[in-house]
Image (cartoon, rainbow, N blue to C red):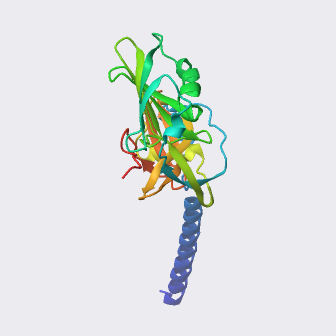
Amino acid sequence: MDWSRIKTIFILTFLVLDVYLVYQFINTRDAAQYEIPKETTLEEKLKNDDISYVEVPEAKNKEQYLSVRAKVFTAEDMEKFKGQSISLGDGTSIEAKLDKRLQLTGNFEPADLSAFLKANIFAGDQYKFWSKNDEAGTITYYQEYENKTFYYNSNAKLTFFLNEDQEVTSYRQTYLEIVDELSEAEELLPPLRAVDTLYKKGLLKPKSKITDFELGYSTLVSLTASHVVTPTWRIEVNGKENMFVHAFEGRVIPLTDGENNTTE
């Protein structure tokens, strides 16, 4: 038996096997690199869950934090408004009773109160309709600044009170003064980034529809004399549910009526 020949054959065999294994390893590694799954886009995720949305609005690329404070009303502020008995209380709110009740139509529309707002309410053109509560007999407006609403802010709120005959009998009003624009303007998150935040948190249910996008303000910090509000995306779902996302940080803000009070 030629052991030298047999040894040579074994060496060549193992060398071929090593080359083959190296070749297989390289092919497997390259295949794995090319087979990295592509991340599903937000649009694809929403489509898979049958979640639709209206046209996304154009918005400024940058906004700022605002410093605000509750206005202290004076008798001089109210001199031009006739036909109402007004009490200023501690000065930060107006409590008014109408001398003549204001009749509303059966199917209320915000336009029904537009003329009254402009003629009989302090800075009435700065308030935007929010909701009508038939059970409580109230119609609620919130103040705006540069077309951005102060969401659920009791210091920027106008509430009309109705009787059983759908007549406005009185109202309560508060108002925020803008003290300053704070810091440098910062980049806003696009509206769909806010939607992505809600989706990842599981707050958007399958087959739902996003019916409105709006940029406004929510309270960030309450101080003694002034308060800081931050740009906030409001995402309306199915025409009735509102969700709020910090427009700089992208976190969900759990706002509800009465929980965004800037009065200490």
Q: Is residue 117 above or below residue 71?
A: above
Q: Position of residue 7 (x, y in %)?
A: 51, 86
Does residue 64 appear left or right of residue 228 in this picture? right
| Number of marks in picture | 0
The residue lying at 56 percent from left, 50 percent from top is 178
Does residue 138 appear left or right of residue 122 in this picture? left
Q: Residue furthest bottom?
A: 4
Q: Is residue 47 above or below residue 167?
A: below
Q: Position of residue 134 (x, y in %)?
A: 36, 19
Quadrant of the rendered image containing residue 132: top left
Q: Position of residue 250 (x, y in %)?
A: 50, 52
The residue lying at 60 percent from left, 52 percent from top is 188
Is residue 39 visible in the rendered image? The answer is no
Q: Residue 44 versus residue 33: which sits nearer the camera?
A: 44
Q: Residue 219 versus residue 189: which sits nearer the camera?
A: 219
Is residue 187 visible in the rendered image? The answer is yes
Q: Residue 140 versus residue 207: which sits nearer the camera?
A: 140
Q: Residue 67 versus residue 1: which sits nearer the camera?
A: 67
Quadrant of the rendered image containing residue 122: top right
Q: Position of residue 247 (x, y in %)?
A: 54, 50
Does residue 62 appear left or right of residue 164 in this picture? right
